[in-house]
Image (cartoon, rainbow, N blue to C red):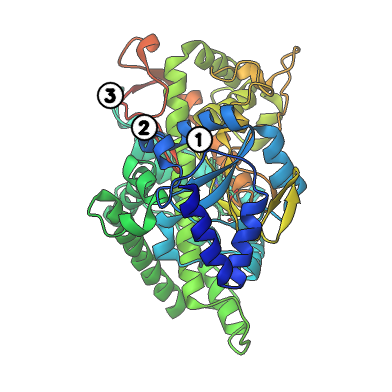
């Protein structure tokens, strides 16, 4: 095998730049398990549980090791310390976007999430300032979230204390906030088209987190030709893009530059402004991909966290009880929760942080690349090398959390019961690629969860001790196990 690798290396070396780059790469990458040609290190992992295997390998090779996903070498980062050194201390160098085959076929490197270089930088800047203009992180959007929380409570009341699965209610609520920003409007929870779109997003999130999704991540070239449910991911993206295209056309027909209604309007105006700039990063294609990115990223993440969070609370009624006590004392029954309450609710704040830590809904982050050749921790990482930031290893780092494998809100409380921040919580990642919707998500999580617990008691359908709070599957996302429960009005 060593001979084959040497042969491969010598052939590449003959081919000029690529060879030089790979030669450079082979010279001083961190050590890792020995790869086989073609399959890389896949014989050393359980493909059904890729993340678990990658975590275990860091036990042998340390916080930074080289791993071959098929023929692609990448460097895996594990634990808070190295993730901080890379994503925060060397933020610029680690800000490239790595391969994510499940979406690559559709995104083609375009849009915010999967873009890289100058185009990504301009798009990200544009998206942040536009979403802020429409209220992201501000009071005006808080009012919208409070209003949506009331719609959600009304839907929950209709369940009349009977068992139900909260998935689509929570998706509707979370998605409606991003819809307000992007499409200028919310949808009714009974709107068939809206429910179909949420189903597409939910299905893609699940597929990317399934064994099929992990196989696609590892062997993209082969898996693209192998029949299986993973091929739906691309088709589902096309359907989402078709919906976005219809919305863009609706906006275009009624566009008024003196009255911007949403993100799409702003993008359409930007296109007009840039139409004579041959180097512009803004195109119809970019608009469509970026809008789908926001819609997708802003929908499933918040609702999965809430769905996971409610399941954890069903498992831990003693935590729910303390939350009720704090909500009753600080907010009372007669007004809606608001963001100002948070600073007076350290326990609730700690529980929400602990839910994000424990639910760990994007366990291996989204792959990055290094943007130039760099020296890092004594190794030489060549430009474009894929980096897998195992965010879960920061969230579950035993040097940062006293009880990492248990759900324990005291991870975020000091001895006096005051809220205590912990930078090792990297649910939104960190550095230049940090989640663009972080402030929005935090608002939604606080207002939705406190509104639910202000109005209802949670009732499980089984003994809390028998509720399994480990994920059903792990890939791009940690998927909570499906469940039903009852909400009893308080
Ligand atoms: C609990 C909710 C959320 C979690 C846990 C979460 C987590 C993440 C993570 C881990 C990343 C990858 C960062 C990286 O590459 O290192 C990310 C990226 C991103 N998120 Fe979120 N997210 C959440 C909510 C949202 C919302 C509500 C939006 C909507 C605005 C959003 C928009 C994005 C975008 C556009 C990116 C790509 C950023 C880039 O590549 O520059 N996210 N998110």
Res. 473 visible in picture: yes
Q: Which mark is residue 163?
A: 3
Mark identifier at residue 421 = none
Mark 1 vs 3: CB contact within 8 A: no
Q: Residue at point 76% right, 13% down?
A: 416
What is the crowding at mark 1: few (fewer than 14 residues within 10 Å), some, or many (at least 20)?
Answer: many
Residues packed near mark 3 inside 10 Å, few (<14), some (14 to 19) or many (20 plus):
some
Which residue is at 71% across, 59% downward? 373
Is 314 placed left or right of 371 in the picture? left
Residue 482 appears left or right of 1: left
Q: Which of the two discs, 2 and 1, labels the residue nearer the N terminus?
A: 1
- Label 3 close to label 2 by CB (< 8 Å): no
Would you name the residue on which mark 2 appears?
156
Screen quadrant of the C terminus: top left
Instruction: Name which residue lies at 66% across and 65% down.
Output: 121
The Cα atoms of the two marked residues, 3 and 2, are separated by: 11 Å
Q: CA distance from mark 2 to mark 1?
A: 40 Å
Q: Marks 1 and 3, Cα distance to the nearest angstrom?
A: 38 Å
Q: Is residue 73 above or below residue 269?
A: above
Q: Position of residue 111 (x, y in %)?
A: 52, 65
Mark found first going from the N terminus, 1 or 3: 1
Q: Is residue 135 visible?
A: no
Mark toward the viewer: 2 or 1: 1
């Amino acid at each position: 095998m060593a001979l084959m690798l040497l042969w491969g290396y010598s052939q590449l070396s003959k081919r000029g730049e690529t060879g030089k780059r790979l030669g450079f790469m082979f010279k001083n990458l961190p050590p890792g398990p020995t790869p086989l040609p073609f399959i890389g290190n896949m014989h050393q992992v359980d493909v059904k549980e890729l993340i678990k295997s990658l975590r275990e390998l860091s036990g042998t090779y340390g916080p930074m090791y080289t791993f071959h996903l098929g023929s692609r070498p990448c460097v895996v980062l594990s634990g808070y310390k190295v993730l901080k050194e890379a994503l925060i201390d060397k933020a610029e160098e680690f800000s490239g976007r790595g391969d994510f085959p499940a979406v690559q076929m559709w995104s083609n490197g375009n849009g915010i999430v999967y873009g890289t270089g100058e185009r990504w930088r301009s798009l990200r800047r544009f998206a942040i300032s536009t979403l802020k203009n429409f209220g992201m992180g501000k009071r005006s959007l808080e009012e919208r979230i409070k209003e949506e929380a009331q719609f959600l409570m009304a839907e929950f009341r209709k369940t009349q204390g009977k068992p139900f699965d909260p998935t689509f209610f929570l998706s509707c609520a979370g998605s409606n906030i991003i819809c307000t920003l992007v499409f200028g409007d919310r949808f009714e929870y009974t709107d068939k088209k809206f429910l179909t779109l949420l189903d597409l997003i939910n299905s893609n999130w699940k597929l990317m987190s399934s064994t099929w999704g992990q196989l696609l991540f590892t062997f993209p070239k082969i898996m693209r030709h192998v029949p299986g449910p993973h091929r739906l991911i691309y088709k589902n993206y096309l359907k989402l893009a078709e919906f976005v295209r219809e919305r863009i056309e609706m906006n275009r027909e009624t566009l008024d530059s003196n009255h911007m209604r949403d993100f799409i309007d702003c993008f359409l105006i930007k296109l007009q402004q840039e139409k004579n700039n041959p180097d512009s990063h803004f195109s119809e294609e970019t608009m469509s991909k970026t809008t789908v990115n926001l819609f997708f990223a802003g929908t499933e993440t918040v609702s999965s966290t809430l769905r996971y969070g409610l399941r954890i609370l069903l498992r831990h009624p003693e935590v729910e009880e303390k939350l009720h006590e704090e909500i009753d004392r600080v907010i009372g029954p007669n007004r809606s929760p608001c963001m100002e309450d948070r600073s007076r609710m350290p326990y609730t704040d700690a529980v929400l942080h602990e839910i994000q830590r424990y639910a760990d809904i994007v366990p291996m982050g989204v792959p990055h690349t290094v943007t130039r050749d760099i020296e890092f921790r004594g190794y030489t990482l060549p430009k474009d090398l894929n980096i897998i930031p195992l965010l879960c290893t920061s969230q579950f780092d035993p040097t940062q959390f006293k009880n990492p494998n248990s759900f324990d809100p005291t991870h975020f409380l000091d001895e006096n019961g005051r809220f205590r921040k912990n930078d090792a919580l990297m649910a939104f990642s960190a550095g230049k690629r940090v989640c663009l919707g972080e402030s929005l998500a935090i608002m939604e999580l606080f207002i939705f969860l406190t509104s639910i617990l202000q109005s209802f008691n949670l009732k499980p359908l089984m003994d809390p001790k028998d509720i399994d709070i480990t994920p059903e599957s792990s890939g791009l996302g940690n998927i909570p196990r499906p469940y039903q429960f009852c909400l009893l009005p308080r």
